[in-house]
Amino acid sequence: MKNSLLLKALHCQNDSRPPVWLMRQAGRYMPQYRAIRAKHSFLEMCHTPELAAAVTRLPIQVFGFDAAILFSDILVIPEALGVGLHFDEGRGPIIERPLQTAQDIDALPEPCIEEALGFVGEAIRLLREDLTVPLIGFCGAPFTLASYMIEGGSSRDLKKTKKWLLNDPESFHRLLDKLAHCALKYMHLQAKAGVQAFQIFDSWAHVLGHAQFREFVQPYLKKMVDGFRSTGIPVILFCRGSSVFAPDLAELQSAAISIDWNGDIRQIRASLPATVALQGNLDPDILYAPEKMLKSEVRRMLRAMKGEPGYIFNLGHGIFPDVSVDAVHNLVETIKSA
Amino acid sequence: MKNSLLLKALHCQNDSRPPVWLMRQAGRYMPQYRAIRAKHSFLEMCHTPELAAAVTRLPIQVFGFDAAILFSDILVIPEALGVGLHFDEGRGPIIERPLQTAQDIDALPEPCIEEALGFVGEAIRLLREDLTVPLIGFCGAPFTLASYMIEGGSSRDLKKTKKWLLNDPESFHRLLDKLAHCALKYMHLQAKAGVQAFQIFDSWAHVLGHAQFREFVQPYLKKMVDGFRSTGIPVILFCRGSSVFAPDLAELQSAAISIDWNGDIRQIRASLPATVALQGNLDPDILYAPEKMLKSEVRRMLRAMKGEPGYIFNLGHGIFPDVSVDAVHNLVETIKSA
């Protein structure tokens, strides 16, 4: 497995084609996923190791991606913290008891992550029995988790979260600290169960200004990256906004940074230390393009990153649920035949 | 007027404190605005020169901003193109007959902008009679206007627009070309009527990847900046995404670039030619912060840009409708007393 394209690229030692996987690759765009989903709720799929493992395997079996990412959701940590979670068709995740006051933060329990999220460890162990590609574990980052716990679900602009951090930064820091603590425990749970790489998702960091990023995002990601270093498992940092925040992320010395689709990844490559691998950054909408344009855009990305020993092909964000399966086949084939 | 702080800063020759104005400064957060709005529809206010002029003057009278920006809306160009426009309380702008096919694009009329948008020229002439600060004219940029005409209104991710440009880039370019043509005529109408600076809003450019920005945004902004250069009126380019796209915008040699709130404006300053002025980039949410934090954030921005002869204080995006008037007073006073 150490010779897998993904792990070689994460160590900036890949002398072959770049590995490819997609964020949310085990998802609704796959008919095989929808068939399982028709019989189980989304959370049930997350909570049941056999189902989570089966869904994780699907895109490897169908498309031949170079890595699997555990099927789960970043909100299992808030769920473990007792704020109540369900998924509403159409509206997405709902936090049933969103945080409203500093007292709500201080009243959060100290959950036993190993117990509360043991089902994730079990899914990982099942997967490691037969997966032939590296398994990527993941979790949400403190800022993004905090935003869901405050907004109560998806939100366009995280207005409540921004108002909170501006009006009461102290309690917001306490929340981030609690979440970083839980997330790090959760990372170690996944490491112990057998993940071979790890991605941290700070999907909502792009709502922040630069100084806010350095105050409310960077220190907590650092805590997690540093606290996980002893495992030797390479960490990928993803946030929307990474086209802007890449230099700040690079200071954290994770194995890799996943770049959103705004920036020119070639220019970003040139601006960062050669020791950090890069992942990304095809516009997820390009999977809606006709075959010819999709292939030419994939090839353009491959040319831009040609010969880079630390490059992982991915989208700039998760794959959309209404993308065609053919487009994904075309993407993977274009990379594998390059 | 040539000695106004704004025009000196736009020519990178300001040796005093930075000028300050805010995008959407004549807006719903002002009780005086709401009083006028209670009696007239938003479009009626745009269409009636006396009302538009009165509303434009309000924030100068109340807060003492260093520049006025014409009260209007970027969608008057689509309106002139006959696609039908109204504003729906809560939902925002509605394009009544959105573009659905390439034929719809080719069927767009060639409006006489001077006639269709003559009311804007009239408002500008009224304002120039008594305004004591420079008047900034503005228009929407082709990509952003196209996106409203295709989506039919506000949209979170411009999915239809992205699919269109990926599946039929030729007709999308024809649309952008038509819009650039109209926008440039509109810019000259405003120049003739007397605006002393001009801002182009490409508010939705941040949904694009870097190569898409260079294909669908940059050339049309260039056409407008180049076609307006003969007037000698300085142009400010604004887009969300400018923290990433600033070097691409700088190639267009406009007088100034307005930076969104993600990037560190000091770092962006260092990366661009000294001949381009910068505007921005306080996080608009900071106006929700308590007085002490608001003031310290404003002072931090002032320190970062201290001594910059080409710097204009502004937010990274428009001011929100629910901001308190006190916060705006505090912001302006902090800058004026720095």
Image: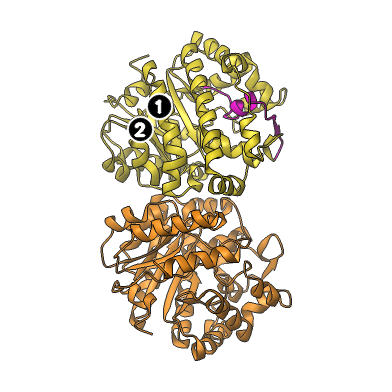
Chain colours: A yellow, B orange
Residue under label 1: A225
Q: Tag 1, which chain?
A: A
- Please say if the residues under marks 1 and 2 sit with CB atoms less than 8 Å apart: yes
Q: Residue B270 at x, y = what percent? A: 27, 56
Of residues B220 and A225, the one nearer the viewer is A225
Q: Position of residue A47 (x, y in %)?
A: 65, 19
- The extreme bottom residue here reads B129
- Local SS, label 1: helix
Give the chain of mark 2: A
Is A36 placed above or below B331 here? above
Considering depth in this image, is B202 or A290 the residue closer to the camera? B202
Mark 1 crowdedness (10 Å alpha carbons): few <14, some 14-19, many ≥20:
many
x and y percentages locating residue B55 in the rendered image: 60, 78
Residue B223 % position (x, y): 38, 70
Q: Which residues are magenta?
A: A70-90
Q: Is residue A109 above or below residue A115?
A: below
Residue under numbered circle 2? A252
Q: Is residue A324 visible?
A: no
Q: Quadrant of residue A9?
A: top left
Three-letter residue code for mark 2: Leu
